[in-house]
Image: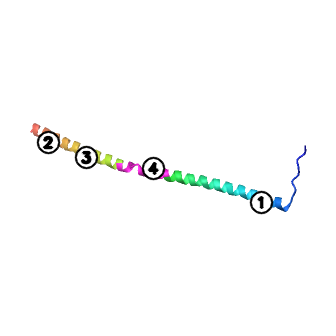
Amino acid sequence: MGSRRRGSTFTRFLEDIVDDTKGLVDDLIDRAKDVEEDVRDTASDFVDDDGDGEDDRDATEAAALRKQLDELRAKIDQLTAMQKGATE
């Protein structure tokens, strides 16, 4: 059972070109899909990072800490004044 040799006719030549072109187009489309998915994932990651309000939360926490620090300083100043008054 030997393999049959394929004839080299003009139509076979065109068929090979069309098949190779189909393969090339399929590969290009697959790569384009991969690139599209990667871009979409990157964009959604970027939006998720910016959209979760982490900067807003940090600013709110910093403002709350500053307020607590100011209140603590006021109490320390009050206690220091009371201590000075008691020793005089």
**Between marks 1 and 4 in the image, the one whose residue lies nearer the viewer:** 1
**Viewer-proximal residue, 87 or 50?**
50
Magenta-drawn stretch contains 8: no
Magenta stretch, main secondary structure, is helix
Location of mark 3 (residue): 67
Q: Are marks 4 and 2 in contact (CB under 8 Å)?
A: no
Give the mark, 1 or 4, whose residue is nearer the N terminus.
Answer: 1
Q: CA distance from mark 4 to mark 2?
A: 51 Å
Position of residue 64 measured from the top left corner of the image (x, y, whole percent): 28, 46
Q: SS class of the residue under badge 4?
A: helix
Q: Quadrant of the image for the C terminus?
A: top left
Residue 17 marker: 1
Instruction: Please rate how many residues cluster around mark 4, counting C-alpha atoms within 10 Å: few if below 14, some from 14 to 19, many from 20.
Output: few
Q: Is residue 35 above or below residue 81?
A: below
The residue drawn where x is 86% and y is 53% is: 6
Q: CA distance from mark 3 to mark 4?
A: 30 Å
In the picture, measured across the screen, residue 14 lies left or right of residue 73, that is right
**Between marks 2 and 3 in the image, the one whose residue lies nearer the viewer:** 3
Q: Are marks 2 and 1 in contact (CB under 8 Å)?
A: no
**Between marks 3 and 1 in the image, the one whose residue lies nearer the viewer:** 1
Which three-letter amino acid code belongs to the residue tagged 2? Ala
Q: Is residue 12 above or below residue 77?
A: below
Location of mark 4 (residue): 48
> Which residue is the extreme one toward the front?
11
Q: CA distance from mark 2 to mark 3?
A: 21 Å
Location of mark 2 (residue): 81
Q: Which residues are magenta?
A: 44-56
Give the mark, 2 or 3, whose residue is nearer the N terminus.
Answer: 3
Which three-letter amino acid code belongs to the residue tagged 4? Asp
Magenta-drawn stretch contains 45: yes
Q: CA distance from mark 2 to mark 1?
A: 95 Å
